[in-house]
Image (tube, rainbow, N blue to C red):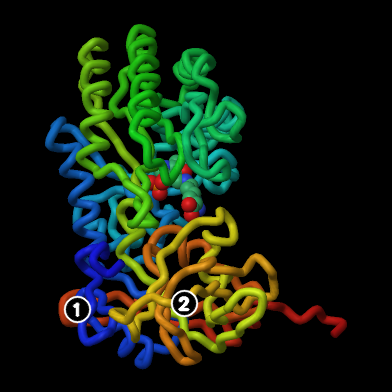
Amino acid sequence: MTSLLPPHLTVKDGHLHISGHDCVALAEEYGTPLYVTAEDRIRENYTRIHRALADRYHRVRVLYAAKANGNLAVLRALAEEGAGADVFSSGELGLALEAGMPAERLLFNGSSKSPEDLRLAVEHGVTVSVDSIDELHQLDSAARAGGRVAEIAFRVNPALEVPTHPKIATGLKTTKFGIPADEIAAAYREALACSNISPVGIHCHIGSQILDLEPFARAAGVMVSLAAELTDMGVTLRFIDLGGGLGIPYNRRTEHAPTPEDYAAAVMPVFLDGIRECGIEPELWAEPGRYVTADSTILLTRANSVKKAYKTFVNVDAGFNLLARPAMYNSYHEVLVANKADAEASEEYTIAGPVCETGDLLAKDRLLPPVSAGDILAVLDTGAYGFAMSSHYNSRPRCPEVVVKGETVALMRRGETLDDLTGTMVRPPWQ
Ligand code: LLP
């Protein structure tokens, strides 16, 4: 397995290292559970996907999907690289702005925006991906109230079957996202009639963790044919946003993931032919989340006990409170024993978290070196939708996150304490 690791994960003297830092020493210093992120890997991933697209077209903008990992340290690094962001809430909008991403590099997405979300988008002059005609009219009113014109795209539902987990396939015709492709022209007509709305783009996102390129190419085809129709209608499209979704090989032994270059080779010819036919030169926007951050981060968790029962369980101190993906999507994350990283994998274990739920298993039936209490396990590829989806379930304070860069290590989020749990609770006056 260790021969298949990404370059920032290495094994030295039997210990797993991340960007040259000994994971066992990090676990000792900061305690477990602990998320550890390699900042340079995030920068590399962003640059690679940006370059793959920009090598084929001169007007490319990459909007990192902030929902994947919204830590300010991550967003700041990406802002420095020139990234914008797909923001899906007022919280993500606030974080992206605080990280130094200019408002014009952001797109406010979401199928259920509140009046306050719309007001904030108008106030900051952020382009909105509008998800319904109802929302369009609310935004028009909010823009009028703010004395502004709101720039928008519509989110298209391209009605595409996508081979991924059903919970993260967003472009199916039955999902809650977007406006059906055959109603898009009418939506733009409606937008053109709004006094405080300017339609400037078109947007789709077909799903996440997609390992097959064909759906991306098909979606690009749907988008450029809609662009042609809109151009004929008199809409000037400044951008076409193809969303995110490029998957990663969580199981490096069995899964093959297309690279950003493969993605660009599949999508760009469709995009370029399409816009040439329309006679337009819009910016191409892409919204990768997982590709940028997933493999940058590991979750270190300590074995509290080992139990031989129907299966042999390793009971660790991190569960679906900190990493929801295995329980939620049955997803695979590689697990290594960080302090026995080059020992032979000879025993089968199921890695169980501390949460009071049968489904709280981080990994099932894995071959690992013999594990004992006190060993440090590393769960790989946890930088996207890892901490971001964590919770306080079972009243467990959330763990710290550290970031490594070169020789240095720093906290990017302190661990919570019991006071953080009770701090927002209010005692009713009669108690
Ligand atoms: N753009 C939009 C509008 C999205 O909704 C998403 C993800 C992205 C971009 C980024 O997609 P990515 O490149 O990361 O695949 N929690 C799930 C994933 C949910 C994705 C939601 N939308 C998971 O852990 O797999």
Residue flagged by tag 2: what amino acid is it? Glu
Between the C-alphas of marks 1 and 2, the distance is 28 Å
Query: In the image, is the residue at mark 1 within 8 Å of ligand 1 by its beta carbon?
Result: no
Labels 1 and 2 touching (C-beta < 8 A): no
Instruction: Give the mark toward the camera: 1 or 2.
Output: 2
SS state under label 1:
loop
As displayed, is residue 312 above or below residue 95? below
Q: Is 269 displayed left or right of 106 in the figure?
A: left
Question: What SS does tag 2 mark?
Answer: strand
Task: Return the residue at label 1.
Answer: 20
Write down the quadrant of residue 404 in the picture. Answer: bottom left
Q: Nearer the viewer, residue 300 or 15?
A: 15
Q: Which residue is drawn at the image coordinates 55% and 72% (left, top)?
A: 350
**Residue name at image x 50 percent, y 91 percent:** 373
- Give the percent coordinates (x, y) of residue 341: 31, 79
Q: Which amino acid does the dot numbered 1 rest on? A: Gly
Please tell me which residue lies in front, 44 or 149.
44
Q: Return the residue found at the far right.
A: 430
- Find disc 2 in the rendering and name its residue: 347
Instruction: Give the position of the N terminus as an image quadrant.
Output: bottom left
1 or 2: tag closer to the N-terminus: 1
How would you rate the neighbour count of disc 1 (Cα within 10 Å): few for under 14, some for 14-19, many for 20 or more? some
Which residue corresponds to the image point at 27% horizontal and 16% vertical from the top-left? 274
Residue in view at x 65 percent, y 82 percent: 422
The quadrant in which residue 370 appears is bottom left
Between 294 and 332, the one nearer to me in the picture: 332
- Please state the horizontal and vertical placement of residue 143, each as a whole percent of the image: 48, 35
**Residue 411 seen from this side:** yes
Please state the horizontal and vertical placement of residue 159, each as a whole percent of the image.
52, 24
- For the view shown, which residue lies furthest in the top direction? 232
